[in-house]
Image (cartoon, rainbow, N blue to C red):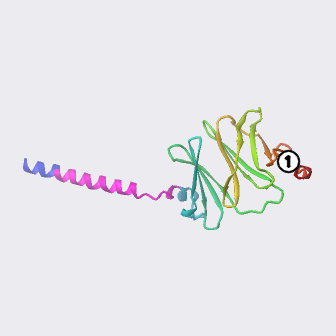
Amino acid sequence: MNKRKRALIAGFLILAVILTVVVIKIINRDPIAPFQSRAGSMHQLDRDSRVTYTINSHHVDFFTDSNGETLVFYSDANHDIIKYLYFPKWTPEDARVHWHLSARQDSVIFTSVLLDEAIDRITVKAEDGREMSKELHPIQYNNYRFVIAVDNRIQQSPVDITGYSKENKVVYKNVNQKYDKSLFK
């Protein structure tokens, strides 16, 4: 009986040590590690550059890498990374709005970068006229103006993006991308 008690106590002690080590590892887990792993070795994320927003129960994390380029990570409510987008430093010549649409099972992630200073805000509509959000306002990060929305009203491309000036004039439409200089007078 004495040997059985010793074995039982030793087993509990070993289990307690293992449990303690696991808890310490969980507590000390690097919060940047999942993002760095997803981005790969090509992008060394600057941990001080992280900015997080919550949009419709999704988490959007902005990072700057060691080259000064921008990465945007999208996570679900459980903080599982869904996808990420990489925005290099570029000087656009004729692009006024750069945008990306990604469909998930129950929602769509819309990301755009407003490259034209004349565009103050945008609206986004599906081909059938359903609107993703009334107005999407820019988020400033790393000298970019991002517009991000997560919604279930738009299921796929194409989308109609309309850009408005501060005076509420239409200054951009992606459906007809003519650059009308008279709009900026």
Residue at (58% x, 58% y) in the render:
39
Query: Which of the pair 152/156 is nearer the observer?
Result: 152
Q: Which residue is mark 1?
A: 177
Residue 165, placed above or below residue 128: below
Q: Residue furthest left?
A: 1
**Helix, strand or loop at mark 1:** loop
Q: Quadrant of residue 101?
A: top right
Question: For the residue carrying disc 1, how many other residues have a C-alpha within 10 Å: few (<14), some (14-19), or many (20+)?
Answer: few
Residue at (75% x, 47% y) in the render:
121
Q: Quadrant of residue 134?
A: top right
Image position, residue 106 (x, y; %): 60, 35
Image position, residue 139 (x, y; %): 67, 52
Q: Is residue 41 left or right of residue 102?
A: left
Query: Which of the pair 2/126 is nearer the observer?
Result: 126
Q: Start and end of the magenta stretch?
A: 9-34
Q: Is residue 70 magenta?
A: no
Q: Is residue 29 magenta?
A: yes
Q: Residue furthest right?
A: 182
- The amino acid type of the residue labelled 1 equals Gln
Q: Is residue 113 left or right of residue 94?
A: left
Q: Quadrant of residue 104?
A: top right
Q: Is residue 70 left or right of residue 16?
A: right
Q: Residue furthest bottom?
A: 67
The tally of labels here is 1
The majority secondary structure of the magenta stretch comes to: helix
Residue 143, placed above or below residue 54: below
Residue at (81% x, 44% y) in the render:
168
Image position, residue 58 (x, y; %): 57, 44
